[in-house]
Image: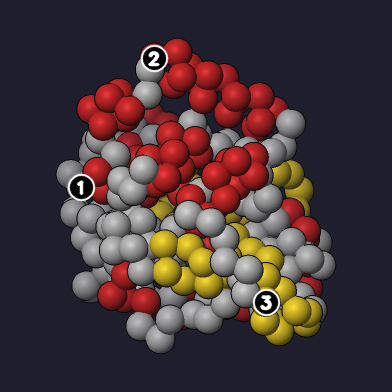
Amino acid sequence: MADKREMIQCKCRICGAEANRKLYYVKEMFFGTGKEFPYFECEKCQCMQIAEIPEDLDEFYGKEYYSFAVPEMPKVATDQINKTRILDVGCGAGKWLLEKYAQGHVNLYGCDPFIEADINYEPCIHIKRCTIHEMQGNFDLVRLSDSFEHTADPYETLVSIKRLLSDEGMCLISMPVFPNAAYDICGVNWYEWDAPRHLFLHSIKSMEYLCQKAGLRIDNVQFNARDLQFISSLLYQKGIPYIEHSEDVINNSFTAEELQKFAEYTAALNAKGYGDHAVFVIMKK
């Protein structure tokens, strides 16, 4: 789909810069509704962002998007007890927290405003139905895995992260990043747009700006894009929604040689910091 060349006056919700900017119209392709949403790029902080946040985002999520199925309680590694206090933000039913419990962690907390009710896995996993702003406590590790880009208030979220971190604590934010090679090649079909759920596609610049403003610092950025940055983006070009990207569909759409090249190219892009996904290691100043 070709970009529409409409230009409008836009104010960046990250750095506040105002300018006449090009709009990119991106289709909702996870479920394949095809509804278009305008985005724009801030030339100052390089953050790509939705032009207008929909009033009711709940309608664009479904059980297929995030799994809230309650996983089975694993056995804890009692010979490896770890008392590190961990908070998983946007944790759903707590699958990752249960994995940490199986590794011997015993101070595990989570929060997610979209679960139906609080969840407690006895004796030591406690998940609250709330946002990060409502959480209390002091944590050695705060984790946001593919949830920060869904956040309408990224600066305020970082302020809450700082409040919740212990002095030597660490925050890990894993999310799509912009710009990147998959966007360069596929444009509005880049699958990590995920319109309209991804409200902000942050750059290293925009994250540096937000962290500085919130009293935090980025200690490290680790690129960890997957070959889906090309596979799913190219399937989007064919009009195939994400929920249909099964192994059979992928193998019928690409040769083994093509898939191998996607994997090799992705590894090379991650090595030079130009993949479409990364983990930001964030600390207090």
Q: Quadrant of the C terminus?
A: bottom right
Q: Estimate the spatial distance between the alpha carbons at disc 1 and disc 3, rounded to whole Å.
A: 47 Å
From the image, tell me which residue sits under label 3. Answer: 7
* Foreground of the two, 127 or 280: 280
Query: Which amino acid type is shown beneath numbered disc 2?
Result: Ala
Give the residue displayed 27% in from the left and 25% down from the top.
252
Residue 117 coordinates in the image, percent (x, y): 23, 73
Residue 4 coordinates in the image, percent (x, y): 57, 66
Query: Which amino acid type is shown beneath numbered disc 1?
Result: Pro
- Furthest residue to the top? 257
Q: Estimate the spatial distance between the alpha carbons at disc 3 and disc 2, rounded to whole Å.
A: 42 Å
> Vertical placement of 98 versus 213: above or below?
above
Crowding around mark 3 (Cα neighbors within 10 Å: few <14, some 14 to 19, many 20+) is: few
Q: Secondary structure at mark 2?
A: helix
Give the residue displayed 62% in from the left and 51% down from the top.
177
- Which label sits on residue 71? 1
* Foreground of the two, 151 or 268: 268
Q: Quadrant of residue 245?
A: top left
- Which label sits on residue 256? 2
| Mark in front: 3 vs 2 | 3
> Vertical placement of 219 versus 224: above or below?
below
Crowding around mark 2 (Cα neighbors within 10 Å: few <14, some 14 to 19, many 20+) is: few
37 left or right, relative to 34: right
| Mark in front: 1 vs 2 | 2
Q: Give the number of callouts.
A: 3
52 left or right, relative to 285: left
Query: Which amino acid type is shown beneath numbered disc 3?
Result: Met
| Mark in front: 1 vs 3 | 3
Q: Secondary structure at mark 3?
A: strand
User: Which tag, 3 or 2, sits closer to the chain's start?
Assistant: 3
Q: Quadrant of residue 116?
A: bottom left
Tag 1 and tag 2, C-beta contact below 8 Å: no
